[in-house]
Image (tube, rainbow, N blue to C red):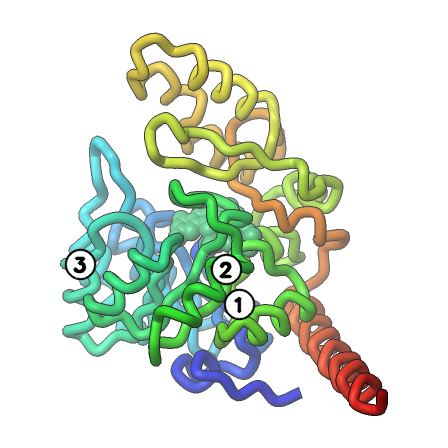
């Protein structure tokens, strides 16, 4: 199947599937595997401790693929924020052509990257934020529905409605559907809604090349669509996580805290433990991101097998649709 969408054209890729920036997962190995298989692989800037190390990871990715890849830069509220402009400068210095931005107040960083001629994919969980990003000059939106792993926003609008609203409201700016996608059926549904491609996070965690512990991959395969929990709503930082003992503890603190001080829950939701889970495989050790799409994930293929399968399924959908529509027209 030959895909020709605004996203394949703008990004120079063969299949309109993007691998979202995944903290502690999106290293060079995974990103390069996705790009080599025809999608867009993305490495995560803040998974690297500093801009110099990020430069090395970019060079490593380039040594593993000759195809386009991107870097994700996520701007989240923090008591001790990273030096975002320095990370952006490292990306510019390394001549990266595509950046995925996400998070709050991205204006100055988007400006810095756009001035360097970089193509920007910006993630948004509402149409209002998507429109604001268009005014800032982004090239492509990634529309993250409520099903998604990680930061779901505070509006709780799932992908079916959110992407249809994006089609109605975003004019000529192309968008990628994100949250709840794992296969060719989802890809074709997204294209039908008006998206120019899909973004996948949880699905790429359960692949051979994802550099995380096998227990985490197997938990995703064993888990289903009921296996996620939303935490941190009280602090307007709602996050979808794999349900485990730590999310249960977090929910207990969130509902019982008299003060509402973040410091009460901070030790339970610390990213330090989430990183440990991914590296060492004790899935109860900390909170870690996963999406409802777990219900659709039943194996751990290589990235190339996965993207080939998505393409095959997309072909099947097209054939079935042609058949259904033809059958109806005979009536
Ligand atoms: C382990 C993990 C880490 C993530 N880290 C980030 C991140 O640092 N920045 C970001 O913009 N999105 C992050 N996300 C969200 C994904 O890029 C993507 O938007 C989301 O997974 C899509 O939903 P899906 O899991 O249903 O495919 C993360 C998701 C996962 C599963």
- Residue at 44 percent of width and 83 percent of height: 6
Between disc 2 and disc 3, whose residue precedes?
A: 3
Marks 3,1: beta carbons within 8 A: no
Picture coordinates of residue 130 (x, y %)?
A: 32, 61
What label sits on residue 198 in the rendered view?
1
Tell which residue pokes out farthest to the front in this image: 331
The vertical placement of 277 against 21, above or below, is: above
The vertical placement of 252 against 172, above or below, is: above
Say few, some or many: other residues with alpha carbon within 10 Å of mark 2 (under 14 / 14 to 19 / 20 or more): many
Between disc 3 and disc 1, whose residue precedes?
A: 3
Residue nearest the viewer, comparing 220 with 124: 124
Which corner quadrant of the image does residue 15 belong to? bottom right
- Residue at 26 percent of width and 69 percent of height: 134
Q: Which residue is mark 3?
A: 107
On the picture, is 267 further left or further right than 87? Answer: right
Q: CA distance from mark 2 to mark 3?
A: 22 Å
Marks 1,2: beta carbons within 8 A: yes
- Residue at 20 percent of width and 51 percent of height: 105
What label sits on residue 178 in the rendered view?
2
Secondary structure beneath disc 1?
A: strand
On the picture, is 326 further left or further right than 69? Answer: right
Residue nearest the viewer, comparing 158 with 42: 158
Which corner quadrant of the image does residue 237 belong to? top left
Picture coordinates of residue 200 (x, y %)?
A: 55, 60
Between disc 1 and disc 2, whose residue precedes?
A: 2
Picture coordinates of residue 218 (x, y %)?
A: 71, 43
On the picture, is 182 further left or further right than 276? Answer: right
């Amino acid at each position: 199947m030959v895909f020709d969408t605004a996203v394949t054209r703008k990004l120079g890729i063969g299949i309109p599937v993007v691998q979202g920036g995944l903290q502690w997962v999106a290293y060079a190995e995974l990103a390069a595997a996705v790009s080599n298989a025809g999608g867009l692989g993305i490495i995560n800037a803040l998974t690297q401790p500093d801009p110099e190390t990020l430069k090395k990871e970019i060079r490593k990715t380039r040594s593993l693929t000759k195809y386009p890849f991107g870097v994700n830069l996520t701007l989240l509220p923090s008591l001790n924020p990273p030096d975002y402009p320095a990370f952006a400068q490292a990306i510019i210095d390394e001549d990266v052509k595509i950046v995925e931005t996400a998070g709050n107040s991205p204006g100055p960083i988007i400006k810095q990257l756009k001035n360097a001629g970089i193509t920007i994919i910006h993630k948004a969980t509402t149409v209002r934020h998507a429109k604001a990003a268009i005014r800032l000059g982004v090239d492509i939106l990634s529309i993250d529905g409520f099903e998604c792993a990680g930061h779901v926003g505070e509006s709780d609008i799932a992908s079916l409605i959110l992407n249809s609203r994006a089609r109605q409201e975003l004019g000529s700016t192309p968008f990628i559907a994100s949250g709840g996608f794992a296969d060719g059926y989802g890809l074709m549904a997204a294209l039908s809604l008006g998206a120019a491609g899909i973004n996948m996070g949880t699905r790429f965690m359960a692949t051979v090349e994802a550099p995380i512990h096998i227990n985490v991959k197997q938990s995703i395969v064993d888990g289903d669509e009921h296996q996620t929990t939303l935490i941190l709503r009280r602090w307007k930082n709602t996050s979808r996580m794999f349900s485990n003992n730590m999310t249960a503890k977090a929910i207990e603190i969130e509902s019982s805290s008299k003060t509402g001080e973040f410091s009460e829950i901070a030790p339970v939701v610390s990213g330090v433990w989430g990183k440990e889970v991914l590296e060492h495989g004790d899935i109860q050790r900390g909170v870690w991101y996963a999406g409802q799409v777990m219900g659709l994930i039943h194996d751990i293929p290589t990235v190339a097998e996965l993207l080939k399968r998505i393409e095959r399924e997309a072909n099947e959908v097209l054939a079935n649709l042609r058949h259904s529509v033809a059958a109806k027209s005979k009536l």
